[in-house]
Image (cartoon, coloured by chain):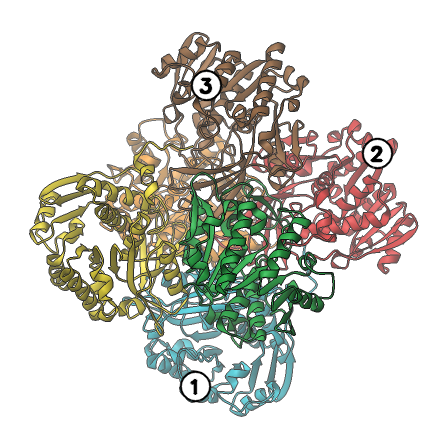
Chain colours: A red, B orange, C cyan, D brown, E green, F yellow
Amino acid sequence: MTALVTLGESMAVVAASTPGPLAPGKPANLSFAGAEATVAIGVSRLGHSASWIGRVGADAAGTMIVHGLRSEGVDVSHVHVEPDLPTGLMLRERRTADHTRSAYYRRGLAGSRLAPGDIDERLVSSARLLHITGITPALGRTARDAVRRAVDIARRAGVVVSLDVNYRALLWSRDDAADELGFLVRQADLVFAGPEEARLLVDEAPPEETAQALTALGPQQAVVKLGAEGALAAIDGAVLAQPPVPVTVVDPIGAGDAFVAGYLAAYLDGASPAERLLTAATCGSFAVSVQGDWEGLPRREELSLLTGDDVIR
Amino acid sequence: MTALVTLGESMAVVAASTPGPLAPGKPANLSFAGAEATVAIGVSRLGHSASWIGRVGADAAGTMIVHGLRSEGVDVSHVHVEPDLPTGLMLRERRTADHTRSAYYRRGLAGSRLAPGDIDERLVSSARLLHITGITPALGRTARDAVRRAVDIARRAGVVVSLDVNYRALLWSRDDAADELGFLVRQADLVFAGPEEARLLVDEAPPEETAQALTALGPQQAVVKLGAEGALAAIDGAVLAQPPVPVTVVDPIGAGDAFVAGYLAAYLDGASPAERLLTAATCGSFAVSVQGDWEGLPRREELSLLTGDDVIR
Amino acid sequence: MTALVTLGESMAVVAASTPGPLAPGKPANLSFAGAEATVAIGVSRLGHSASWIGRVGADAAGTMIVHGLRSEGVDVSHVHVEPDLPTGLMLRERRTADHTRSAYYRRGLAGSRLAPGDIDERLVSSARLLHITGITPALGRTARDAVRRAVDIARRAGVVVSLDVNYRALLWSRDDAADELGFLVRQADLVFAGPEEARLLVDEAPPEETAQALTALGPQQAVVKLGAEGALAAIDGAVLAQPPVPVTVVDPIGAGDAFVAGYLAAYLDGASPAERLLTAATCGSFAVSVQGDWEGLPRREELSLLTGDDVIR
Amino acid sequence: MTALVTLGESMAVVAASTPGPLAPGKPANLSFAGAEATVAIGVSRLGHSASWIGRVGADAAGTMIVHGLRSEGVDVSHVHVEPDLPTGLMLRERRTADHTRSAYYRRGLAGSRLAPGDIDERLVSSARLLHITGITPALGRTARDAVRRAVDIARRAGVVVSLDVNYRALLWSRDDAADELGFLVRQADLVFAGPEEARLLVDEAPPEETAQALTALGPQQAVVKLGAEGALAAIDGAVLAQPPVPVTVVDPIGAGDAFVAGYLAAYLDGASPAERLLTAATCGSFAVSVQGDWEGLPRREELSLLTGDDVIR
Amino acid sequence: MTALVTLGESMAVVAASTPGPLAPGKPANLSFAGAEATVAIGVSRLGHSASWIGRVGADAAGTMIVHGLRSEGVDVSHVHVEPDLPTGLMLRERRTADHTRSAYYRRGLAGSRLAPGDIDERLVSSARLLHITGITPALGRTARDAVRRAVDIARRAGVVVSLDVNYRALLWSRDDAADELGFLVRQADLVFAGPEEARLLVDEAPPEETAQALTALGPQQAVVKLGAEGALAAIDGAVLAQPPVPVTVVDPIGAGDAFVAGYLAAYLDGASPAERLLTAATCGSFAVSVQGDWEGLPRREELSLLTGDDVIR
Amino acid sequence: MTALVTLGESMAVVAASTPGPLAPGKPANLSFAGAEATVAIGVSRLGHSASWIGRVGADAAGTMIVHGLRSEGVDVSHVHVEPDLPTGLMLRERRTADHTRSAYYRRGLAGSRLAPGDIDERLVSSARLLHITGITPALGRTARDAVRRAVDIARRAGVVVSLDVNYRALLWSRDDAADELGFLVRQADLVFAGPEEARLLVDEAPPEETAQALTALGPQQAVVKLGAEGALAAIDGAVLAQPPVPVTVVDPIGAGDAFVAGYLAAYLDGASPAERLLTAATCGSFAVSVQGDWEGLPRREELSLLTGDDVIR
């Protein structure tokens, strides 16, 4: 039995090492990324078993992703290898120290071929949590159907469903996204969204009201992620505010997914709503304190580093 | 008037800096590559004007390619920017110090959209040399037609046509390649091929006979590139052997294109066949002495560094 | 016709990669720099043609400078190569993260040999803007005369003259500088100066009054650059304040020249005084967000990155 | 059921990145190493399940080792974490490009605390192969007893026992080593040794006779590793010579362990003696073609890269 | 005659170059560190002769330490080389940009073998200052006796004794530390302590009272180091507050030892208490502005860089 | 008493880290170099005291040189700091892996100001060996006079004089060099020269005869350095050939100076001619096995690494 199951696309990442326009000779670093993979790694580092379902190519990038997830203890036995398509790739320019711009090589590649047949019923139905994002259904029809099938299995088995809205304007239209995400949020027990993303589902309003409006759609837990301003949540009828945990920012990417990972791990711990949000904010701060999307995520014994009395020596 | 005109695809290159499997955190270097771009840069460094025709995306990779070519003095005024497609990309793993493996992200991307309308008649007809490769017609129908149109303009204007067979098995079948390359070689005045590639056009035979057989198809100059063993040419009826120019190899990629650049630059100089081959071999050795496809190409005043009496101090 | 013409010295730069005293084994990065070259690159990236006049040595550093400027689209057809003198060089120690100390190798070297004969009358007289700095006349007598000749041609042809005071105490005395810069400012239509530099020309006063006092010397536009506090300008009789555009600082060098580039590009656009100052401040912030003097300068489509709604994705 | 079980010590490795004496500011790379861990990784990359038993500290180095092994698919569920002792560490100076010198921090640290209780009877008795080395019994009395217990379990269960002599003069005396290794070789079915090491067990003789003499002690398979000269084996009564597989050497460390990994994986495949030796030599060459002890080891589909017709592309 | 004599342990340092968990392939930098070595280097850079007494192994790390100290002009003629023990080592993970975690390899190694016989009576008795820290007596009995012997010689010869409390909880218990440090502080003329450390010796109180209470134990000068909040001192009966000197922090480690170095150098200059504290705070800021414990320490002519009018150029 | 005294110029070195033309962003490494400094360091590492006399600027490069020499135990108490001139600098492009090209910034800078007054009579007259090169007298008239003065003191005091011809065509004409070097060789007891350099002094001939001809000018020991072919010497009437010591070459620069250092150190040891040549060749091989001119030089205990039985472990 795996505590958390998630599904989606992971891509190779080529990230320029220093700020400035791309140029011949510029150094870069390799890694991989994917919103759901980050959540799986984060939950695993905090001590709960996690499984990631997805497709990668039969190439060096695909091997890197499988090895990387396995290194973190994430179950990769449900990863499918596409023999004839390359693994997706993201080329990241750090245009300034604060602004990253990415070119995506993903359309029609291995990750987007995720299909309902990839979803193992036994795996999903025996999990405690299914986590999905709004990226996966935007990858194509079969990927959308895979998400629906996973949600369907989960609901029938009484598995808690978590949805991170994660709207990607490059992948589909607002209307298509609103339709599908509207359908998914109604199946979900937990929902995470940024203020902009939430407008796909509910009317514009202050974060507090947005969170409450999201719960009116079905989920008992709705968290509005406010970036550098923390988060605001409506959980089991109560509204809670979570300020950010202070840290020196090295790379802002991955904060939102790390936040979700922290929340879900604490939820699996049986922690209180306030503890879930604090763990979430702590994980978000860990993520941005290290280069890469998931590399900085905390292990359980490290959580107190940012919030406790640990001082440098 | 531009001395050499060439057309094709250039892609961003992400090359792992050290040998070994790709892994999170592994360092890489950015650059760009393209067989025809390497020829244009090589000819330009040796003092002849060169123009490269191709399409790039409106992204950081495309800007890098245009800047890089311009930096080398290559005319980029006929480069077309595709507003909605990314620039192609190549991810290179150095599996061992000797073995490179690449994943290509090029299908359907900006570079493959080259089309006949991109070929400026005035530019081509006023050139002294048109250089084409067997890669471009393999990119798609419009790219093939662009090559044909360029050749057609050149022949009508009495411009010398150079063809590097450059067979890419990933892009098209042997049969398709044999057809199109068979057509092109008959229009060409110069032809370059490896022994394997030559078999698309002529029967298997020792390099000497292969070179002669290629001239029987039309070209007055045929060069069989033998890699670490140098080259063997049939030029204006005579057969010449060119041994390699010794150098410490840093990165074997790009040697063949550098060879062609050297040959064509010397041809534009009015050099003798033997001098052309020596310049070609020298350029090949320069290319492999530096990381990257074109970065190591020599400027005219540097040619004597490998072959002359210059010693280290 | 080139929109902007400028002249001066560009030097190779060796900049220690990390803060701390120089030591054997310390890593560094190569580049090149020059106040006028930065302005030319900045104007070119923003879409206006620019030409840089100067002398470099027949060495690797000189080639790097010519290639670098050409890469950025700057016209280098008026660069002169000195056969027997090395290109100047600057060795930069980052003593702390905030303090850079440079050793200059420039006296008597190629760049300082700039002479009146290097100034092409046709080039200057057909430009829209001539930009000069107070560094060039300090390089030596022939360089001073080259500046005077350029200004003379410009004025006779009705070309707008821009002067950045850029006083370099290492190169000449305050008195010599005050004499020559006093002469030049009276020929200029635009003048840029820091508060300290302005005292060479006008009495000490608050920035606002300083700007106005500078216009009293002749220029219709005077901008007092205040570094981290922005700028204060007197333009066509009106006084404008420009706050800085916030950004994470990676390398503070080059901000002033980037500011001038932005101002002049917007002036060439026909932008209003307030828009000129905003573009100037934006370019200054881009420059300091990336290592190097000019590497971070924005292309036109990037300008909105710092001031607009673009968020990290 | 795990195909191969092995036990021993893994240490963090700090390896200077470039040749030369250690000095402040010199760059280094982190990794981990251990003869048995290299064998486990090599066997796992070639497609057989492998389990590594050992102790690491509750520190960053220990986490790195566990993650690294898990990344490679090696079962780490029998790794014990010592709460109060640091993980061992090796500091490697590359004194020249050809000569590495290591300082060891291992005495009394976590890895040397391996004890009989760490050996899971079920794990060992259900394996197909138990692999041990002469390093582990040299770590201390409890480690020696752990090895004996593992061998005892294996022999009783009919599990094939493989021994790499791996004599470490820093850890124990020749006499102690000869005693214990003499005992172990008599329990083994396969034995690997260098010519020097073999003298602990048999009289000095040419490699061919050495291999045969080793089999006279009990093992049916004895391989004498000859480094750059390949290997010589006595297998099931026949003598076989294996020349080295040519490759550019990047880092000579790890070749011997990679050789063993290749041999054992091929043995698990049911390959012939000659195939075992070829796979062994191929793995040795892969290992030295990449920096690090195990990083370069081949996956099954890569084996043909060095020995087949694959050419650079 | 050496102005300052100090004694203690110096260790090799392996510091991960970038934030994040240790992982195979992660880059690191080598250096060395030791509280007393940092003080000796700092005092030497500020122009006073300094001698460091300690033991290192006969290995690359030991050579690096001796060379590094000698490079800085520190007298190393009283360093003893242990033939059979490795030099201690510290492995530093930068878990986030703000949090460093170190694993220590020092127990029983060369540095901890410091013994009374290592203390040259002539060297100590002819010095102006003896500086000791609370780390050295915690290394073991012989090291403790070496400190006592040095203090004894100093007091008999009228040499000023400086003590930095530097309590290391990993090395000894609070009780043992309180005993020995209580003994040492009574012999000292100057004492430095953090607020936490001071509680080993005096009752908890605000820093001002703490400083005064420390002087009540004997020293005429007591400085309470408050990290980012500066320092508070009781010197010759007067209480002085020293705010921190602002600087961009690159690496917070080493600030305290740099502070002591600055204070002692100014004391050797004959500077006033206020000047001593300002020099101390300036040195602390220099130290944190550069990677490494001592690399950033200022030379005398650099002191004004942070506090004077020097601006970036 | 210092065993070896030498005098000359040391310069900062900026060496591109990777082969290829210089370009913005290319990484480089800082160090320093000087033929005489390399000899001093080499002799010091092999256990004899050495003193280097020269001038450096009051800048970061000068400090780096003094620290670097002091780090190696070289006496720098006779180094003079020029307050107003920068330290010389060398910019090294590695055009290919085998060919380095340097631009020199030395004319009129601090190092060339060496003057007779810098030569301390007591230092020179109490040495066992004075080592000079043909570079120093080429730096200018005062430097030439400083060399003459040093030689004069040495001869009067019976100090052995060693001369490395080291002809630098960029610094003076063949005729001037032949005059001055002809004068110096007649004062020398030992002379080192390459075959080309020797022709300044003796007629062209095979190396064996060249060595003998050099001794006919005065020196009892003459060594002709043959680079990759070793050396040929005429010592005390006998002719000896020294083959090179095999090693993987990382950076060929510095081999000749390292050879001299090894020879002189062995001479100071009282070693036989054959031993001197072997030590010389070993040092030459160490030097080229590491990046930089002197960084790879061996310490005494390391000499056996290349020639002995040490194997990699």
Where is residue F131 shown, x and y percent of the image? 22, 56
Where is residue B86 shown, x and y percent of the image? 59, 49
User: How far is disc 3 from disc 1 in space, using C-alphas?
Assistant: 84 Å
Badge 3 crowding class, 10 Å Cα cut-off, few under 14, some 14 to 19, many 20 or more, is many
Question: Do callouts 1 and 2 point to residues on the same chain?
Answer: no
Q: Write down the chain letter for disc 3.
A: D
Task: Out of E216 and C233, give the one closest to the viewer.
Answer: E216
Q: Amino acid at mark 3?
A: Ala
Q: Which mark is residue A154?
A: 2
Contact? badges 3 and 1 (CB < 8 Å): no
| Quadrant in which the N terminus of chain F is drawn | bottom left
SS under mark 3: helix
SS under mark 2: helix
Classify F198 as above or below D173. below
The residue mark sitting in front, 2 or 3, is 3
Where is residue B172 shown, x and y percent of the image? 51, 34
Classify C263 as above or below E56. below
User: How far is disc 2 from disc 3 in space, using C-alphas?
Assistant: 61 Å
Instruction: Judge whether residue D309 can be spotted in this image.
Output: no
Contact? badges 2 and 3 (CB < 8 Å): no
The total number of labels drawn is: 3
Q: Which mark is residue D178?
A: 3
**Residue denoted by label 1:** C174
Residue displayed at 49% across by 74% down: C3
Residue displayed at 48% across by 17% down: D179
Where is residue F78 shown, x and y percent of the image? 30, 65
User: How far is disc 1 from disc 2 in space, using C-alphas?
Assistant: 79 Å
Tell me which corner region of the image, top left, top right, bottom left or bottom right, holds residue B255. Answer: top left
